[in-house]
Amino acid sequence: MNREDADVAIIGGGVIGLFCAYYLSKEGKSVIILEKGDLKDACSYGNCGLVSPSHALPLNSPELIIKAAIWLFQKDSPFYIKPQLNFKFLSWMLSFALNANKKKVERGMMALNNILQLSRSLYDEFFSEQPLDCDWSPSGIHFVFRHEKSFETYRVKNEKLSEIGLIATPFTGNALLDKEPALSDRVYGSWFYEMDASLNPGKLMTELRQKLIADGVQISDLCEVEGFRKTNGQIKEVITNKGVVKAKDVVLASGAWSPKFEKQLDLKIPVIPGKGYSITLKKPALSPKCPCIFEERKVVATPWKDSVRLGGTMEFSGYSTTLNQLRLQTLKNVASDYLKEPFTEENGEEWYGWRPMTNDGIPIIGRSPLHKNLFLASGHNMLGLSMAPATGKLIAELITNQKPHIDISPYSLERF
Ligand SMILES: Cc1cc2nc3c(=O)[nH]c(=O)nc-3n(C[C@H](O)[C@H](O)[C@H](O)COP(=O)(O)OP(=O)(O)OC[C@H]3O[C@@H](n4cnc5c(N)ncnc54)[C@H](O)[C@@H]3O)c2cc1C
């Protein structure tokens, strides 16, 4: 690579990096994205495609910790921890448990709600300005329950979300089957969140990359960032396997890989990879009309024009790259249990990705406490697609010295 000069260098071409580039470019900044692979390496490529403000409650809760402990002993459960004596992982787990208290969860909910709401409205604005072909569907999402008891237990969560205006409509029996005929008669009911939406993330990434390139953004694939040259609290150069890149500002948007820069940046970035799986299959004749979350088993089915994606599981196995066939088969088994038409197809597109998990469920967005021209946009957990436009907008506002749209203090790295 020849020496490149840009106003902003973005490390990572996942959905967060792309939306940072979009809003920075709109502000008139020249941008280069440095991506070590190509779009398929990102967690953003094969996820379930939900744009979901209804997920404003952080995962940290005593109930989830108990459930997770039970799931550890089930082979086909949605949760797995690889036994490991890794200090970083153990301290992350301890902090996760300590964050599972009422006050912190309440604060977390407000922080997530603010960014999810901003993002949801930015998606509407974005698609009205950029009619990209990526199966955008603002049709709502069903949280589906096989059993009356778990449907009723969820009522408490729904009441909590109602306090911030996230109100779901309950459907049971024939009313549910009329609304969503693909669901099996075995299903008891669903909570329907009208404000949620969905899209095909692989198509969004492909189309957004093309739009950015047309707007003059440089995207350098197969360009791995290896280090930095710093002077006086500033990043002067970004060192890559293709040469040195100079930029006035640098954005770290490298998802689950972000902590790999901890030593070089003298920063503690408490993000660990939370592996999830998906399988994309041909759309059956009787397909769900909107995305369905089979909540008791934490499996998602998202329908698009020609296909359906099943996704889920949370595996803490470090940066493991194996595609566990049991987990992929479990996605099909669970979906077949909740739907009338079972998934028997052998040749689906199998995928895994590493979610960038923080121990409080809140992303890290803001200026580095140690470097004047480094900005962090990482740790988006299970909601990176949902929070991407707002993250991009906030980063662009910070870099162009504008007042951020929302209070960004809950997302600062200094909170850890
Ligand atoms: C099964 C599953 C389902 C999910 N479903 C949803 C959903 O429905 N809705 C939702 O909102 N979220 C969902 N998520 C979460 C979402 O996918 C992530 O939060 C989001 O993709 C994170 O985006 P990112 O850009 O931060 O990271 P990534 O998409 O992982 O992008 C980071 C990029 O940085 C690059 N990179 C890393 N290191 C370097 C380096 N040294 N040099 C250059 N480049 C580098 C990587 O190659 C990668 O492309 C799901 C996740 C999984 C696993």
Image: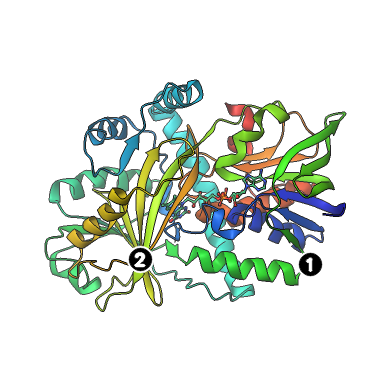
In-image side of 316 versus 16 (left or right): left
Give the image location of residue 378, x and y in percent.
Answer: 60, 42
Residue 305 in sight in this render: yes
Q: What element carries label 1?
A: loop
Give the image location of residue 115, x and y in percent.
Answer: 55, 49
In-image side of 151 versus 4 (left or right): left
Query: Residue, x 49% and y 47% (percent of image)?
Result: 113
Query: Residue, x 63% and y 73% (percent of image)?
Result: 130
In depth, the one of 180 and 283 nearer the eye is 283
Q: How many other residues sit within 10 Å of disc 1, few (<14), some (14-19) or many (≥20)?
A: some
Query: In what quadrant of the picture does the C terminus appear?
Result: top right
In-image side of 332 versus 51 (left or right): left
Residue 407 in sight in this render: no
Residue hosting label 1: 216
Residue hosting label 2: 348
Query: Residue, x 78% and y 36% (percent of image)?
Result: 228
What's the amino acid at mark 2?
Gly
What's the amino acid at mark 1?
Gly
Q: Which mark is residue 38?
A: none
Question: Does the residue tagged 2 have its C-beta within 8 Å of any atom of ligand 1?
Answer: no
Looking at this view, name the residue that lies furthest to the bottom: 285
Identify whether 381 is placed above or below 52. above
In depth, the one of 349 and 110 nearer the eye is 349
Query: In what quadrant of the picture does the N terminus appear?
Result: bottom right
